[in-house]
Amino acid sequence: MPAFVRPASILKTSLGLAAALIAPRSALADPPVIGPQVRVDVGGGRQAANETSAASVDGAPNEIVATANDWRESTGNEIIRMSVAVSNDFGATWTDFLVRPPGPNQSSVEGDPMSCYDQRTGTLWVGAISFAGNGGLYVARKDPGLNTFQPSVMARATSGADKGWMAAGIIPGNPNSTRVYIAYNQGVIWSDDMGLTWNTPRSVGTGIGFLPRVGPEGELYVAYWDFGTGVMLRRSFDGGNTFDPAIRIATRLDTWSTQDGSRFPGTFRVPPLNSLAVDPVSGVLYCVYFDTTNIVNGQRNVDLYFSKSTDKGSTWSAPRVINGDNSPPGDQFFPWLEVDRAGRIHMLFYDSRHTVQNDGVVNGMFDAYYTMSADGGATWSEHRLTPQSFNSDNDGLNRGQQFFGDYNGLGLGGDFAYPNYVSSQNGDTDMFVHTIRNRSLALEPPSPGRVNEVNSLVASNAAPGATVYFAYGLSSGVTNVPGCSGLAVFLGAPAIAGSAVADGSGVATLSRQVGSAARGRTIFIQAVEQSSCTPSNVVKTVFE
């Protein structure tokens, strides 16, 4: 029997033997390394910025793009543009500039920025909406290694567009393809030529905050709020040509209008939008939304609710609160989710827990938080990002009602997370990013990947002298590792192929003969470092 394919009874026994060798611990041994706060929109001066997004790719995590609404051209009247910032040094330094629609489609309000990535090609896109009769959705593309964007193109000329978000991934059945999607209030559009031309919209119903995500097999998911109690999902398994009927992810306990902020300190609006993410290897879906849990001392307590689906969105776990808090409780809102190839869930959100304050006070005090889960959302590790709480009244705008935007963003590249948020700590709303690294093993596909030969598995980034276990399964899944609190391998019924000790460079190599029974079978492989319970990415392979 080849080392990578065994009967199910042996798979379960093997995992138990390996788990017994891993020492128990109470938390992840390698917490994320959070870099300093870095301002992104330095060209914006003292003018306002809000509604951020960010994107990076695994193949070049040093390259990041970040976007925001930007008021830098405002004088007497408000003029809103999309500012775009680019970093090529893992977020240490940034160059920012404006990206506008083609000349005939320009207007005084160009906002609702968005960004997305294509892991297959390393391409990054940004986009926004020109809010005018001659406007609509526009996008611009950044090719790998460049600091500049190609000229923007109109993805959809329309006067009625509102809040779009982007995503990219393969077309179902074609792993060598890229399809770029935009979901917005009029439907879903896509491009098969890297954003140059776009089709007409496919309706996905009534709502707002339509957020597209693409699964590992090209599944298209669109989450949205239905203006009522519904946290909703539409899905397509044919690249957006047709959509299944709407699925209710969760039912809200409380709801309010897009312009209402009365449940929070400050006077800015807080539309109850949802965030959705999909594991790029296992396809597990995660959703977070914010809702009123209860009323404490006459003040509404708003929390983050988490739900997941392991069957491509057909059914969802019961929503549960996942944020920490103080007493009396603060409010948590504007979450943004991403999942990396190691299965870790990353989230950015706003939090008012550090100041005891009433709903509706003018000086709402808030912080930005980053949190991460390495066990499919069972447990979370929270980290305060802002150096001190910032004041919502310092929004940089001369309006009767404050405005902090309607969302924030977070990009992922390899082991790096880049939360991109707005803070008014300098007296106006500026855009900030941290470089956060979560160490993981880097596992390469088996080489040469052929049956009836000796194949090698190579894991790098291990601690020199550490024992690395190589596990495999015949399906993706989520399996907690006994003795490693907060750690899961993302394999179904995993077995241990063997172990190796990392050399002085942190490289562990396991070589095994693979027999003919493995030919044509899809196998998922993941490595775990024994001493720190540090996981690798998941490799999906088919032996020739």
Image (tube, rainbow, N blue to C red):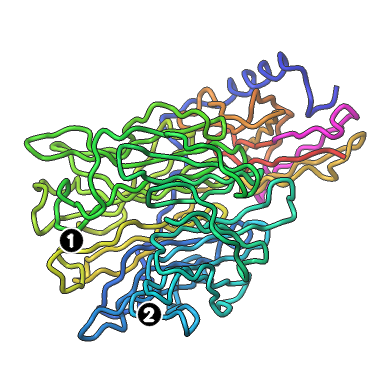
Mark 2 lies on a secondary structure that is loop
Q: Position of residue 53 (x, y in %)?
A: 42, 61
Distance of mark 2 from mark 1, alpha carbons? 28 Å
Crowding around mark 2 (Cα neighbors within 10 Å: few <14, some 14 to 19, many 20+) is some
Q: Is residue 128 visible?
A: yes
Badge 2 amino acid: Ser
**Part of the protein shown in magenta:** 502-524
- For marks 2 and 1, the one nearer the N-term is 2
235 relative to 190, above or below: above
Q: Residue at x 69, y 42 (%)?
A: 539
* Residue receiving disc 1: 392
Residue designated by label 2: 107
Q: Quadrant of residue 112?
A: bottom left
User: Residue 513 got which mark?
Assistant: none
For the N terminus, the image quarter is top right
Q: Is residue 327 magenta?
A: no
Position of 376 compared to 72: left or right? Answer: right
Q: Looking at the picture, does residue 375 appear above or below residue 394?
A: above
Residue displayed at 63% across by 56% down: 119
In the foreground, 497 or 358: 358
What amino acid does circle 1 point to? Ser
Placement of the C terminus among the 4 image quadrants: top right
Asked if residue 503 is among those painted magenta in the image, a careful observer would answer yes
Q: Nearer the viewer, residue 434 or 402?
A: 402
> Badge 1, how many Cα within 10 Å: few under 14, some, many 20+?
many
Q: Position of residue 174 (x, y in %)?
A: 74, 50
